[in-house]
Image (tube, rainbow, N blue to C red):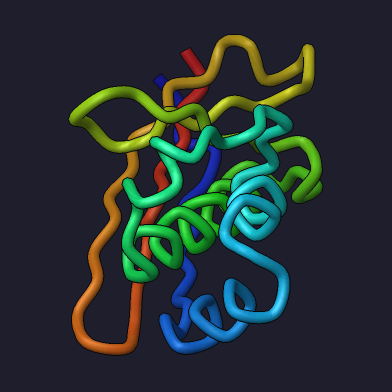
Amino acid sequence: MKLLGVGCDIVRVSRVERLCALYGYAKVYRKLCNNVKMISPNEQKQLSPQSLAGRWALREAACKAMNVPLLSVRLCELKNIKPEIVIDRVDMQNVLIESSISHDGDYAMAVVVAYSI
C-alpha cells in the first residue's frame, strides 16, 4: 500500500445549528453529506448537530486527503457505524480509506488517511 494523503478538518457545531435553523435539517443534511436521498420524518431526529458537524468535517477531510473536489465525495449512512466515504471518480476505485470522527463541546473534527491498494 502507498500513502495517498492525510486530511483533517474541524467544524463549529453552532454553525451547523444555525444552518439547520435557517434552512431546515433535511436540506442541510443533503448539502453537507452530498446525499441526494430525502430524509423521511422518522430519520430526521437521528443525527445530533454534533454528529452532523462531524460528517461535514469528515467530507472535507476526505477531500484534503485525496485531493479531490468536494462534489466528488459523498457519505453513505450505515446503521450503528460511522458513515462510509464514497468517491465518485474512476481513478479512486482502488483506494483504502481510514477515518475517525470526534466531537466535544462546540467543535467536531475528522481525520482521513487514504492509501492506494
| Left-right relation of 72 to 1 | right
The x, y position of residue 14, in whole percent, is: 45, 88
Q: Is residue 115 left or right of residue 22?
A: left
Residue 64 visible in the picture? no
Q: Residue at x 43, y 22 (%)?
A: 96
| Residue 51 percent location from the top left of the image | 34, 59
- Residue 14 at least partly seen: yes
Q: Position of residue 75 (x, y in %)?
A: 54, 35
Q: Tell me: residue 111, above or below residue 71.
A: below
Q: Give the position of the N terminus as an image quadrant.
A: top left
- Note whether 13 is above or below 20 in the view shown: below
- Between 117 and 111, the residue placed more toward the observer is 111
Q: Residue at x 67, y 20 (%)?
A: 92
User: Number of marks in the image?
Assistant: 0
Left/right of residue 41 with respect to residue 79 in the rendered view = right
Percent position of residue 100, x then y: 27, 50
Say which residue appears at 72% left-offset and 70% top-offset.
23
On the image, which quarter does residue 20 sit in?
A: bottom right
Q: Given the current orientation, which residue lies at the most extreme front position? A: 41
* Front residue of this view, candidates 39 and 36: 39
Q: Along the line of sight, which residue is nearer the eye, 75 or 97?
A: 75
What residue is at 73 percent from the left and 32 percent from the top?
Answer: 36
- Please say if 109 is above or below 70: below
